[in-house]
């Protein structure tokens, strides 16, 4: 009798545990389609489809003819999309037959949450805890490095970054990473760049570390990043509830044409702009820090790191009007993509956000450019290509080459901006 009771206890403990594991979002048989939009009626059909059903995840919106679009389709809608594609003569290819297979495979390239910070490396993806412990370890190791903790996320987690400053007179570069939770290559690349600034013996990298000061925030959306490990691998937003849905796209929440085109006012959408301008604690923490430091720390350069699509973009995202220093931004962007190609042969494209990817409003780069007058402001979309078959699940063996490309672009772009006079006193060419 007694042993039966113990057995039942053990068994129910096991059941609870098993139930916890199975609460992770799953994407078995979710298919990725790449669609080639050729007619107005196809545009309309896809817009309606996105509106009426959450069984289709759009990577971008259907906007115009002559546009390629990736969508992820839930398995019970495969017959429906097949029929719709036939009826509307919509061409497309299946990029992937089961998203879950990729997610399962990726598990082998994630270091456990308990990994000691000394074992941090760029062959694996890491939990937020490990990244933050690694940052602390660097701060304990390198004299010119200081930890910055901003309050706080919806879940009361700090936004943790570092400041590397060898000379108070240097101009500063701000590296904002991980604003979109599922884009894991962003935090991975930013920690790589930091490590290179701290340890590289390459003269061009030493030059950057000595002659610029650096603010590097690997994960500015800590709740979302946590949730991609512990809830839903494909989560993009923060985790704050709004009605029955939750999550604000923090890169739509800034006060730059807030809730304009390319953002949604529906909390259930992936690009929900939030309850109001800068409604989210993460946005507020970043904006407050930037406002307080932009002049004193001479922050003239801002990079926001995303994936995927292989783009190097500058303002604006919300208007086709050209930025005041458009020609310089074009020239600097060109240097960036040339340096990327020279590193591992990868092709990136550079241009204004609205011309290059799609309209967006309320993004951080537009905001630092317009509101804070930071003249050199870029959004990177790292690997893979626009028709990537793995999207945000970039294989871990591509972390280092991708991060090397980012570093090469940063070296080349800071050099180009310097030659154009942006890093000399009075060199803020925004007044021109
Ligand atoms: C869409 O994809 C096809 C096939 O990859 C390519 O040939 C075409 O140039 C793409 N169109 C646009 C507008 O990107
Ligand atoms: C965050 O902290 C505040 C103040 O201590 C508390 O009221 C709130 O419930 C916490 N939020 C979460 C999501 O834990
Ligand atoms: Zn992104």
Image: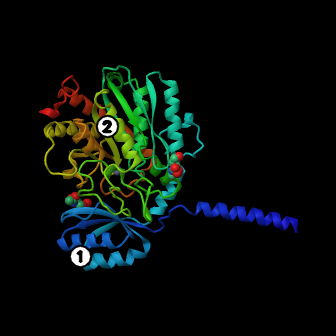
Tell me if residue 236 comes above or below residue 208 in the rendering.
below
Q: Is residue 109 visible?
A: no
Name the spot of residue 81 as percent of width and height, x first.
34, 75
Q: Residues within 10 Å of mark 1 (few under 14, many from 20)?
A: some
Left/right placement of residue 107 relative to residue 400 reads right
Mark 2 = which residue?
A: 343
> Which is closer to the viewer, label 2 or label 1?
1
Picture disc at residue 263: none
Name the spot of residue 153 as percent of width and height, x first.
45, 46
Residue for point 36% across, 30% down = 214
Residue lying farthest to the left in this orientation: 432
Tell me the quadrant of ligand 1. Answer: bottom left
Picture disc at residue 89: 1
Left/right placement of residue 420 relative to residue 15 reads left
Residue for point 25% across, 62% down = 68
Quadrant for the N terminus in the image = bottom right
Say which element carries label 2: helix
Q: Residues within 10 Å of mark 2 (few under 14, many from 20)?
A: some
Identify which residue, 168 or 39, lies in the foreground. 168
> Reading the chain from its start, which is encountered first: label 2 or label 1?
1
Say which element carries label 1: loop
């Amino acid at each position: 009798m007694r042993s039966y009771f113990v057995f039942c206890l053990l068994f129910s403990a096991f059941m609870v545990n098993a139930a916890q594991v199975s609460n992770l979002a799953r994407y078995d048989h979710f298919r990725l389609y790449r669609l080639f939009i050729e007619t107005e009626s196809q545009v309309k059909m896809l817009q309606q489809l996105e509106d009426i059903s959450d069984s289709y995840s759009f990577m971008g919106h259907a906007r115009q003819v002559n546009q390629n679009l990736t969508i992820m389709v839930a398995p019970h809608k495969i017959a429906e999309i097949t029929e719709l594609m036939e009826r509307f003569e919509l061409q497309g290819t299946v990029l992937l037959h089961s998203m879950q297979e990729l997610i399962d495979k990726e598990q082998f390239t994630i270091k456990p949450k308990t990994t000691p910070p000394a074992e941090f490396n760029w062959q694996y993806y890491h939990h937020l805890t490990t990244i933050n412990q690694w940052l602390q370890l660097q701060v304990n190791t390198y004299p010119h490095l200081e930890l910055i903790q901003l309050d706080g996320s919806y879940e009361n987690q700090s936004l943790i970054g570092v400041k590397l400053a060898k000379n108070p007179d240097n101009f500063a570069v701000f590296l904002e990473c991980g604003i979109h939770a599922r884009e894991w290559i962003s935090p991975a690349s930013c920690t790589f760049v930091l490590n290179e600034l701290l340890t590289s013996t390459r003269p061009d990298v030493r030059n950057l570390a000595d002659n610029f000061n650096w603010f590097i925030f690997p994960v500015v959306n800590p709740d979302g990043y946590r949730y991609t490990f512990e809830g839903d691998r494909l989560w993009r937003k923060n985790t704050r509830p709004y009605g029955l849905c939750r999550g604000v796209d923090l890169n739509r929440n800034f006060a730059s044409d807030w809730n304009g085109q390319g953002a949604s006012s529906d909390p259930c959408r992936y690009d929900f702009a939030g309850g109001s301008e800068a409604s989210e604690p993460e946005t507020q923490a970043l904006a407050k820090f930037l406002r307080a430091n932009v002049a004193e720390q001479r922050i003239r350069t801002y990079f926001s790191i995303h994936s995927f699509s292989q783009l190097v973009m500058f303002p604006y995202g919300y208007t086709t009007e050209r930025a005041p220093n458009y020609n310089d931004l074009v020239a600097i962007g060109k240097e960036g993509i040339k340096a990327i190609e020279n590193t591992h042969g990868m092709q990136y494209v550079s241009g204004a956000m609205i011309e290059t990817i799609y309209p967006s409003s309320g993004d951080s780069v537009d905001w630092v450019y317009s509101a804070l007058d930071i003249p050199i402001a870029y959004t990177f979309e790292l690997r893979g290509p626009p028709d990537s078959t793995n999207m945000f699940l970039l294989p871990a063996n591509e972390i280092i080459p991708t991060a090397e490309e980012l570093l090469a672009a940063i070296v080349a772009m800071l050099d180009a901006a310097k030659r154009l006079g942006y890093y000399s006193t009075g060199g803020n060419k925004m007044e021109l």
